[in-house]
Image (tube, rainbow, N blue to C red):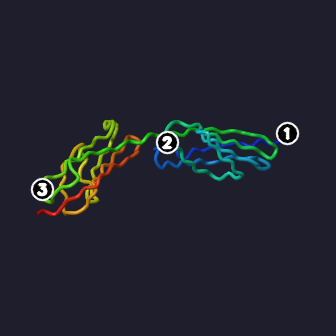
Amino acid sequence: VVFPQGNSVLDVLTDSLCLYNNIVRLGNNSFIPEGNFTSIQWLFGDGNKRTQIDTKPVEYSYNDTGTFNVALVTTTENLCRDTSVGKVVILPMPNAELNVDKRIACFNADPYFLRDISINPSSYVKREWIMERNIIATDKDIFYSFSQPGNHVARLVISDTFGCTDTSKVDLLVNPSP
């Protein structure tokens, strides 16, 4: 007796993602001419796996960077198996770091001096300094005076060539002028 063979068809819907908050979407276009799949197993290439009985797509999040070989293994009711493979790349995150000359200043006095001290800044394609909810500069180092006394947050956002971003922030206090 010859049993119908199922065909595993893996569709990697998102193949390159940044490490933080990555959600890889994997489509399953497997088909069988006659009969049913009794098992559909996803092997994510990092030692983890998931088994399901339907051909719905899955979402998966990786905990480390690297290139992962993903496999979709289908089994029919007659124990015929087929495997389809794909590749997912999880990219390292940039590491934003900033330095500020002081944490407390007086209003209308010397401005804050903020420096981008991120590791390997030459690999970044975008740098934004955000103060008072506005992007105010893209330079490596900046001077800034806040428009009002009070508690403020200075943010440095960097992006690399893959679109991965990281933010560093520091709380600053601007006291009223004496």
Give the position of the N terminus as an image quadrant.
top right
> Which labelled disc corresponds to residue 167?
none
Amino acid at pointer 2: Ser
User: In the shown orientation, is residue 106 left or right of residue 3?
Assistant: left
Give the secondary structure at mark 3: loop
First in sequence: mark 3 vs mark 1 = 1
Give the secondary structure at mark 2: strand
Give residue 69's position: percent from left, percent from top.
Answer: 59, 37
Amino acid at pointer 1: Val
Say which residue label 3 marks.
Answer: 109
Give residue 54's position: percent from left, percent from top.
Answer: 70, 53
Front label number (2 vs 1): 2
Q: Residues within 10 Å of mark 3 (few under 14, many from 20)?
A: few
Say which residue label 2 marks.
Answer: 16
Residue at the far right in the pictured view: 1
Say which residue label 1 marks.
Answer: 2
